[in-house]
Image: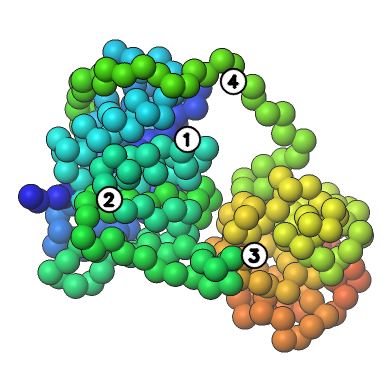
Amino acid sequence: MNYKDIFVLCEFQHHKLVEASCELVSEATRLVAKRPDLNYDIVGVVIGDEPQEQIDEIFRYGADRVIKIHSESLIEYDSVLYAELMKQLIETKRPDVFLFPATVMGRDLAPRVASVCETGLTADATKLDLTEDKDSSLLMVTRPAFGGNLFATIVCERTKPQMATIRPGVMILNDRKESIDPKVEDLTLETPNYAAKTKIMDTIHKELKHADITKADILISGGRGVGDNFEVLKEAAAKIGAEVSGSRGAVDAGFIDKELQVGQTGKSVKPKIYVACGISGAVQHLAGMEKSDFIIAINTDESAPIFQVANLGIVGDALEIIPLVTEEIARKKASYFQS
């Protein structure tokens, strides 16, 4: 039985396409570009009725086709129902690769789909690649392992589809296309006859106390070495329009809120400038920030691993140096806007 194409679950929240889905479509374009001999399409999967202008966004990031799934019971999310519908889709269309965003819904749905389809799933991936072997289409999925102390690359050799969930904020978004040719297939699937075991009683939207650090252009991040002096970082950040984040060590010590944690167990970020203050550079932290455009590392330990990924490394006391760094960034920004 032949399996073909890369499917991406395109999740919507309040009828708006989730950015993590756009990231996966973008990454899929890079995978198929590496292996043009496979002649794979990138197919966005939409469950239920969503606004056409939002579906168009899937094409703007590189999808070739979109499949809209219709069923009588698609009023609210039900993981068992959705998994059965995904099974029908997979049996009908036979995708080689199926990618899910590692959102709350994606983390819940993907393992259920893998279970009912009796295939493998690599969860919480940070990197995707396709083998260069022309006789194979193996997806190579990299994720942190052993408590984040190393990275493992996992393949699913014997079953299809090859499945993975990918952390939001890890993959780079493509530039949006202005001109698109939407090819949408409406697919009506049979509603499984079963008694729902769960019912969503209410949805409560969390009020965020902080800005979304995944959207920041400049991040000043503090580690355990900053101690309880995060106010210094906040003052410096305010001068240049930056946001403040922290390492797991800083969060565990109570110096900064969990919402602002960068790393394997926190958020993945890719700002234009990432300033690491008093952060040693454990693998767990690097997994969440190594795709930043420009990394400035400040640490008293000249052998700290953070310097291995930094574009600019400064050995010294971060609390003394960060005001000077932000002053220089502010000066550069001012001269840029004046020119």
Q: Is residue 81 left or right of residue 272?
A: left
Count of number-bearing discs: 4
Pointer 3 with pointer 4, Cβ within 8 A = no
**Residue indicated by mark 4:** 203
- Residue visible at 51% across and 65% down in the picture: 144
Q: Nearer the viewer, mark 4 or mark 2?
A: 2
**Label 3, label 4: how many angstroms apart (C-alpha)?**
32 Å
- Residue visible at 84% across and 69% down in the picture: 225
In the image, residue 245 sits, relative to residue 283, either above or below, namely above
- Residue visible at 64% across and 53% down in the picture: 266
- The answer to which of marks 2 and 1 sits earlier in the sequence is 1
**Label 4, label 2: how many angstroms apart (C-alpha)?**
32 Å
**Residue indicated by mark 2:** 119
Q: What amino acid type should be assigned to the residue bearing mark 4?
A: Thr
Label annotation for residue 105: 1
**Label 1, label 4: how many angstroms apart (C-alpha)?**
13 Å
